Amino acid sequence: MAVEPGLAARYQQTVEELRAVVLSLQQYRARLLEIERVLKELERLQDNYVYKSFGNLLFKTPKEEVMKELTSEKELLQVRVEEFSKREKLLRERLSSLERQLRGAQGA
């Protein structure tokens, strides 16, 4: 028996969506690790000012301001990682279901 064209298309679309979610999740996790490392270094730093990069320029900025910005970004990234992790799980479940349906259609 032939595989339903819509089923194969949904499977392929789910695979592509999962790839995109996994890639975004990796990027968010990498940025989160980077921010955590920077925050640890800032905590150790005795100076009250640090240099913050904007394009090709460096600006002297109060350390506490930079720490607040990074902490805020860290919190946002943690939410995104959680959301994308849930999305990844749902997509993997959908993919598994579609694989079973495809195997059933091919075996019938």
Image (cartoon, rainbow, N blue to C red):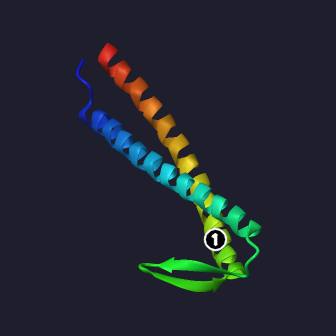
Quadrant assignment, res 7 = top left
In the picture of the structure, the residue carrying the numbered disc 1 is 70
Q: Quadrant of the C terminus?
A: top left
Q: Is residue 83 above or below residue 97?
A: below
Q: Is residue 28 above or below residue 106?
A: below
The secondary structure type at the circle numbered 1 is: helix
Q: Percent position (x, y) of residue 5?
A: 24, 34
Asked whether residue 31 is in view, the answer is yes
| Residue at the far top in the pictured view | 107
Answer left or right for 58 relative to 12: right
Of 15 and 39, the residue lying toward us: 39
Q: Residue at x 62, y 85 (%)?
A: 61
Q: Amino acid at mark 1?
A: Leu
Of 99 and 29, the residue lying toward us: 29
| Residue at the far front in the pictured view | 46
- Label 1: few (<14), some (14–19) or many (≥20) C-alpha neighbours in 10 Å: some
Asked whether residue 108 is in view, the answer is no
Q: Percent position (x, y) of residue 84?
A: 54, 52
Q: Residue at x 61, y 69 (%)?
A: 73
Q: Quadrant of the N terminus?
A: top left
